[in-house]
Structure formats: structure tokens, C-alpha cells
């Protein structure tokens, strides 16, 4: 499995739920991880940029506080040595990849002349405007380390330059030609997100804890109370739902930003999956229904075509020159992933994976938690 930079964005320290499942799979000997050096260097660089952005956000928030209240507040700025933290992160990432036995693929032994020729020939992964130098290095790194009979998954969000048009799961024909030139006889597919790899390749192979799932669903598992956990973690649920929110209504174009202004208590809970890892830790996936107050924006000319039963109503026609604000209370379906250590009775990870409004045509076939 070859990782592009987007694989590290949501979990830069590789400590989250998805990373633990991936590590379980890799350490069982069923897969190997490879990270091109150009990707590794980019991830380390982006770490510093994100760190600097977060510190700037704190300073910006303080300025807004002073502007709103007309009072001066003495803020304690985080004392961050950006260079040192970047170096620490680099060592930390190297160490955690090493625990997976991951390979760092070196920069390819290819001349600028050959890369430029590929660009001028408009061969992928170069794009029309000459962009794609970094992607070209990634691809050449893969080609130079290729196991000719191997089975590969390239995890990248850059489907425009690595994939066929209209098919985000298959390599572009130019790249397939490169593989054929190498007499490659294995398989090579593309997936956009680590969740896709987990759902398709990894989770089906891991050991289920069906007895625990049964007891959790019926609130009979003595070590963990899901209802209480969701209450204790309510702020994390709200934050995660806002970050992962996806609103979609048939035949209606919503324009971002849209968001959640209020979230009520959990209504229904379905325990979807429980996996037991080799160290005894439990991966628990639950689906939860919440009633939520949401807001969104619709182009004014489109408002006239809204059906009478559309669940949101116009609350500010003149939000700006082109858009009207709509708000309402709808049902959101959240998918939440939990890592739980039965020995210590500790939650080691709690993440909202997605938050969507339930499609009108989808029945509620989950079994409510009693």
C-alpha cells in the first residue's frame, strides 16, 4: 500500500482509530506500507504550516474578542518553537512508520530531462498546465521499487492526475502503460481515503467480537455504557459532526458553508461492528441518530422551485445579494468509531467518521439500542 500525503491529514501522528486498524493489519504480515520520500517530506512541511496556522488562529480570535468587547484581554500566547516541533514530528513519524515496518521509497533516479519530456508529452500524472512535478516523482518512486507480481493500492485523493476520467478507483491509461512496459503482472488499484481501504480490504479480515457487539446493542456489556459515553463525549460529538457534516437533498443545490447550530440528545443507537485487536483492544463502530438544527444557503432563483415539504425554510432572504439562508431541524445520522481497552476500561480513541442527513428513501433498518 503506497500512501500519499492526504493519508496523514486527519491523523498526522498515526494514533487514531483508522491508523490502529491499519497497523493491526500490517503487523499481521498481510500487507506492507510504502511512503515515497517526496510524500514524507511534504507531510513534515505541512505539519509546520498547520502548526503556524493554529497559533495564528489563536491570535486572531483574541483580536476579535477585543473588537467585540472593546476591552483589552491579556492573552497567553503558546510558546512554540516551530523548528524544534517540526524536527520532533519528523522523528515521531519516522518511529511510528517503523513500527509498521513501512518503507520510505527514495527519490527516484530519474533526470529532470526525462521528467520534463513526460510533462511536455502531457503524460499523467502531469496535468495540462505543467503541474505535477511532485506527482511525477511519486510515480517514478513507485516504478523503481515495483514488485512485478505484487498487489498494490495507491491511497491518494489526487484522482484527477492518477486515475481515469470518471473512475476514481483505476489508474490512468498512461500509468497502466508504464506498468506494462515494466512487464508488471500484478494488480494496481487506487483508493481515495483510508476509510475506503479499511472497509474494502482490512475490516473484513479482522476478528469479530460478536458477543460483545450483542451485549453492547442490548446495553448488557458491563464494561462500557454507550449511552453514558455519548453523554460524556457530547462536545466531541458536536465538534466532529460539524467537521464531518454532509447535507444533501434531492434536486437541491446547497452552497457551502452549511453547518450545525444545535444538536439534541441521541435518539437511536445501532452497534454496527466490533473488532477485537491482537492486544485485546476493541474497535467499536456505532451509528447514532440525532435531531439537529442546521443552516445552509441556496441561490435565490432556486428557492422558488423548492417543494412544499422541503425540511428547511428561508429565514433570511437577503443574506447577501445572491443567496438566501435556510434553516431547520432535521435528523442526522452519525457514524462514530471508538477504541476501547477492556483491561483499563479506557476510551483510547473517539472519532466522528461522518455526519449526514438521512436520505428520504432510506428506511431505518437498524436495531435501536435498548
Image: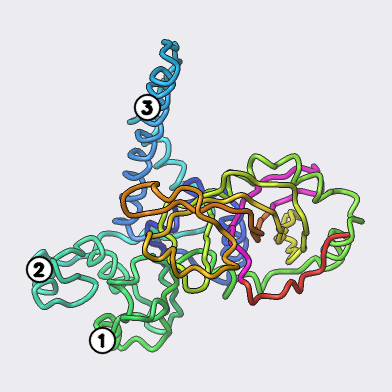
- Lower sequence index among marks 2 and 1: 2
In terms of secondary structure, what is the magenta stretch mainly?
strand
Position of residue 126 measured from the top left corner of the image (x, y, whole percent): 19, 70
Give yes or no for contact between labels 1 and 3 (Cβ–Cβ under 8 Å). Answer: no
Which residue appears at 52% of the width and 51% of the height? 295
Position of residue 132 measured from the top left corner of the image (x, y, whole percent): 21, 64
Residue 9 visible in this rendered orientation of the protein: no
Left or right of 221, for residue 294 = left
What element does badge 2 sit on? helix
Q: Nearer the viewer, residue 98 or 294?
A: 294
Which residue appears at 44% of the width and 80% of the height? 150
Q: Quadrant of the N terminus?
A: bottom left
Rendered view: 100 above or below 110: above
Q: Which residue in the structure is indicated by mark 2?
A: 116
Q: Quadrant of residue 239?
A: top right
Left or right of 276, for residue 75 = left
Q: Which residues are magenta?
A: 338-359
Which residue appears at 32% of the width and 54% of the height? 322
Position of residue 359 measured from the top left corner of the image (x, y, whole percent): 61, 71
Give yes or no for contact between labels 2 and 3 (Cβ–Cβ under 8 Å). Answer: no
Q: Which residue in the structure is indicated by mark 1?
A: 177
Foreground mark, 1 or 3?
Answer: 3
Amino acid at each position: 500500500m503506497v500512501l500519499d500525503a492526504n493519508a496523514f491529514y486527519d491523523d498526522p501522528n498515526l494514533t487514531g482509530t483508522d491508523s490502529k486498524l491499519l497497523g493491526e493489519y500490517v503487523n499481521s504480515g498481510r500487507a506492507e506500507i510504502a511512503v515515497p520520500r517526496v510524500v514524507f517530506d511534504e507531510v513534515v512541511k505541512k505539519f509546520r504550516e498547520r502548526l503556524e496556522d493554529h497559533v495564528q488562529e489563536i491570535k486572531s480570535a483574541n483580536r476579535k474578542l477585543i473588537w467585540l468587547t472593546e476591552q483589552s484581554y491579556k492573552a497567553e500566547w503558546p510558546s512554540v518553537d516551530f523548528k524544534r516541533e517540526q524536527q520532533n514530528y519528523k522523528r515521531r513519524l519516522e518511529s511510528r512508520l517503523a513500527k509498521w515496518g513501512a518503507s520510505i521509497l527514495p527519490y527516484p533516479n530519474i533526470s529532470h530531462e526525462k521528467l520534463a519530456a513526460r510533462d511536455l508529452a502531457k503524460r499523467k500524472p502531469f496535468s495540462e498546465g505543467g503541474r505535477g512535478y511532485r506527482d511525477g516523482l511519486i510515480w517514478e518512486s513507485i516504478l523503481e521499487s515495483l514488485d512485478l507480481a505484487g498487489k498494490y493500492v495507491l491511497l491518494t485523493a489526487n484522482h484527477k492526475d492518477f486515475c481515469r476520467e470518471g473512475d476514481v478507483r483505476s489508474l490512468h491509461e498512461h500509468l497502466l502503460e508504464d506498468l506494462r512496459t515494466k512487464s508488471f503482472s500484478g494488480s494496481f488499484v487506487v483508493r481515495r481515503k483510508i476509510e475506503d481501504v479499511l472497509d474494502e480490504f482490512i475490516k473484513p479480515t479482522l476478528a469479530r467480537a460478536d458477543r460483545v457487539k450483542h451485549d453492547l446493542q442490548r446495553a448488557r456489556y458491563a464494561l462500557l455504557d454507550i449511552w453514558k459515553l455519548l453523554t460524556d463525549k457530547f462536545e466531541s460529538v458536536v465538534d466532529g459532526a460539524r467537521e464531518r457534516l454532509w447535507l444533501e437533498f434531492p434536486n437541491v443545490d446547497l452552497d457551502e458553508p452549511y453547518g450545525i447550530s444545535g444538536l439534541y440528545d441521541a435518539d437511536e443507537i445501532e452497534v454496527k461492528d466490533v473488532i477485537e485487536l491482537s492486544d485485546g483492544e476493541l474497535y467499536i463502530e456505532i451509528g447514532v441518530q440525532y435531531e439537529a438544527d442546521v443552516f445552509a444557503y441556496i441561490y435565490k432563483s432556486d428557492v422558488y422551485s423548492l417543494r412544499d415539504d422541503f425540511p428547511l425554510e428561508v429565514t433570511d432572504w437577503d443574506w447577501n445579494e445572491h443567496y438566501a439562508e435556510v434553516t431547520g431541524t432535521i435528523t442526522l445520522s452519525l457514524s462514530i468509531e471508538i477504541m476501547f481497552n477492556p483491561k483499563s476500561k479506557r476510551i483510547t480513541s473517539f472519532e466522528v467518521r461522518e455526519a449526514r442527513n438521512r436520505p428520504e428513501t432510506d428506511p431505518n433498518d437498524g436495531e435501536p439500542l435498548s
